Image: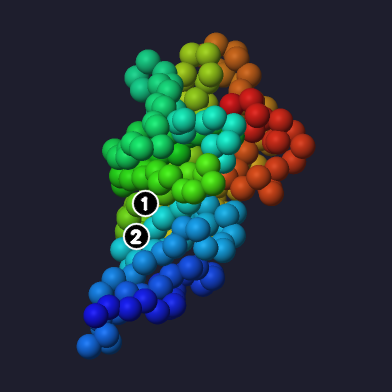
């Protein structure tokens, strides 16, 4: 016999809707389960949280009532940005070191030295969730926030964060600092090769947007 019992097996520091599946004979946990439909704070779950002692995850919920059939992201290739549209039934595995950007979600190109696994799940009521899973940042891992000219694709600016040392809180602080730095210096936003001006950057969290950043979020 097995049973379910509400529990908080992971020390995420937030209220997560976990339960344990228990072997009733021994009382041992057979697995941890997380119910994506139970109450949660979507903005909080978007920020990356430890989900085991080895992995981080971030969740993004989609309302499909407007007819969305795919989620999109852009990967930077040698000849410029490549749009990758994945249906809500496709799992993506993003190799390390591929710069990626999602319009409206984060206003920079993120470069990760580890791979990222992107798993969508359909939910009732015309909703879907996309789950991004990656390893807990290990010692020596660096992430980069980068901007490329939108006309000639040359690198405009980049900022590296030693995520293995500063962890996720340090990552978000570096993200904010990098966005502030890029937005605060017109010379960084104007291409030295072709002269094109780059729109403002914005962070992963809409609550940090100035009115100008909110406009940029719609743009790129
Ligand atoms: Zn340029």
The residue lying toward the viewer, choosing from 50 and 210, is 50
Any part of residue 9 in sight: no
The residue lying toward the viewer, choosing from 125 and 209, is 125
Q: For mark 2, what is the residue? A: 55
User: Is 141 on the left or on the right of 187, as rendered?
Assistant: left
User: Is 27 on the left or on the right of 56, as rendered?
Assistant: left
Q: For mark 1, what is the residue? A: 133
Residue for point 59% across, 32% down: 66
Give the structural element (helix, strand or loop) at label 2. strand
Q: Quadrant of residue 130?
A: top left
Q: Is the Cβ of the residue at disc 1 closer than 8 Å to that at disc 2? A: yes
Q: Quadrant of residue 100?
A: top left
Residue for point 37% across, 51% down: 133
Work out which quarter of the rendered image holds the N terminus and state it: bottom left
Q: Point out residue 181 in the picture as x, y percentages from the top left corner.
A: 63, 40
Q: Point out residue 204 in the picture as x, y percentages from the top left corner.
A: 57, 45
Counting residues from the N terminus, which is met first, the one under dot 1 or under dot 2? 2
Give the structural element (helix, strand or loop) at label 1. strand
């Amino acid at each position: 016999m097995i049973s379910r019992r509400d529990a908080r097996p992971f020390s995420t520091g937030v209220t997560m809707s976990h339960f344990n599946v228990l072997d009733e004979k021994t009382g041992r946990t057979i697995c941890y389960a997380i119910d994506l439909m139970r109450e949660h704070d979507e903005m909080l779950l978007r920020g990356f949280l430890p989900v085991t002692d080895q992995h981080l995850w971030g969740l993004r919920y989609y309302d499909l009532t407007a007819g969305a059939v795919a989620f999109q992201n852009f990967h930077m290739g040698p000849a410029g940005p490549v749009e990758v549209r994945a249906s809500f039934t496709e799992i993506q595995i993003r190799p390390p070191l591929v710069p990626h950007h999602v319009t409206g979600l984060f206003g920079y190109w993120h470069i990760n030295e580890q791979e990222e696994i992107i798993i969508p799940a359909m939910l009732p009521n015309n909703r879907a969730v996309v789950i991004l899973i990656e390893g807990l940042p290990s010692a020596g891992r660096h992430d980069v926030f980068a901007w490329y000219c939108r006309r000639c694709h040359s690198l405009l600016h980049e900022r590296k964060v030693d995520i293995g040392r500063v962890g996720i809180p340090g990552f978000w602080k570096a993200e904010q600092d990098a966005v502030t730095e890029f937005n605060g210096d017109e010379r960084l936003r104007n291409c030295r090769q072709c002269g094109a001006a780059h729109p403002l950057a914005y962070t992963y969290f809409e609550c940090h947007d100035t009115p100008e950043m909110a406009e940029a979020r719609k743009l790129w």
